[in-house]
Image (spheres, coloured by chain):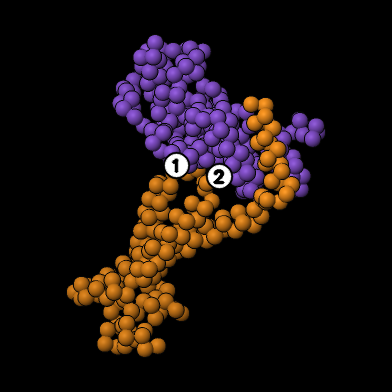
Chain colours: A purple, B orange
Amino acid sequence: MTVSVGLSDEKIVENTRTGNKELFAVLVRRHQDALVRYARYLVHDEHKAHDVVQESFIKAYMNLNGFDTRKKFSSWIYRIVHNEAMNMVKKYRKEYPLVDAQELVSGEDLLGDLGRKETVRMVHTCLNDLPILYREPLVLFYLEEKSYEEISDIVRIPMGTVATRVNRARGMMKIVCKNKN
Amino acid sequence: MQKQKLTIADEVLEKIRSDRIAMRPRWHFIGGSILLIAGIAGSFTVSVFLVSLIVFSLRTHGPMGAVRWEQLVSTFPWWAIPVAVFGIYGGIALLKRYDFSYRKNFGTIILAVAVSVILSGYLINATGIDAWWAGRGPFDTLYRRYDGSGQGGGHGRGYMRGR
């Protein structure tokens, strides 16, 4: 198992496919922390987040032969977790409003107003008050440090929409944080 | 947290070891892709053919166009439309879920396919390819049903039914 330390995710996938099935556990251990944190922001519950991630890894393993190793495994597994979390959100729809009245905030450009550090601090404080539609790209961009392209892959929306949602979410978060304080 | 960290990896590994979960074979994904491509190619070919047939039929009828149009509508294989739509949507739904290679703007693709089908059908008709193949092999019978020569000559629906 120690040999796998230097291997890329995609190389591990290839080795797992060719027979070393237990190597898959290395991938699970590599990504589970970040994925549970990401899922927790979506489903607001530690246990549900845990279930989502576990189910996602099971689905990933079952569909491993369908993964294109020229792509990033991390984006793929985030995509699966996104799907699983959204299924759970739909299942408990009343608990997780996808969009609420705060969506009506203006789409003005607020990128110049805040620095990245300040935004990250605000994300941690006020994130749970945002609707999922905006919370998710914000988490991926500021907390998981994914690029717009990766977010676009994970959430399956165009890059322009990712940028718009991140920008709007920042504006909404400013209002939410102000109200909180 | 540490307990959960171990649990996820260990539980997944335990399921793998006990064969409670297994990788879907490679052919499942290759086969799915091939079927989808074949389905799209087939739908495209059939659609181009039908568009060309419609244009051909309308062009050759003259004053009896309305009658021939009714005949065309009554003999058109309408069942093929839901089959094509369902097949393509089903194929995409099966394959796109965890596969980035299917991250495309499907609205644009469908629009592009529809436009290219109509354009191809029109070009086939404009260049006279349909007239050329109308007299050959299985196309001969089919085109006779739409070019007006079948009327009264036993080549209409009755002709086909009687065969």
> Could you tell whether A84 is left or right of B85 in the image?
right
Q: Residue at x 47, y 16 (%)?
A: A125
Q: Secondary structure at mark 2?
A: loop
Residue occupying image coordinates x 30% and y 88%: B153
Residue A63 lies left or right of residue A105; in this view the side is: right
**Tag 2: amino acid:** Tyr
Crowd around label 2: few <14 · some 14–19 · many ≥20 (10 Å)? many
Q: Classify B67 as above or below B91.
A: below
Residue B113 seen anywhere in this rendered image of the structure? yes
Q: Tag 1's secondary structure?
A: helix
- The answer to whether residue B123 is above or below residue A126 is below
- Residue A52: percent from left, percent from top: 56, 38
| In-front residue for pair B96/A158 | B96
Quadrant of the snapshot with the C terminus of chain A: top left
Q: Residues within 10 Å of mark 1 (few under 14, many from 20)?
A: few
Residue at image point 60% right, 58% down = B31
Residue situated in front as seen by the camera: A113 or A84: A84
Specify the quadrant of the image occupied by residue A173: top left
Chain letter of disc 1 in the image:
A
Residue B63 at x, y percent in the picture:
19, 74
The residue at which mark 1 appears reads as A91
Percent position of residue A40, x then y: 53, 29
Q: CA distance from mark 1 to mark 2?
A: 20 Å
B33 or A64: which is nearer to us? A64
Q: Chain of mark 2?
A: B
**Is B25 rendered above or below residue B46?**
above
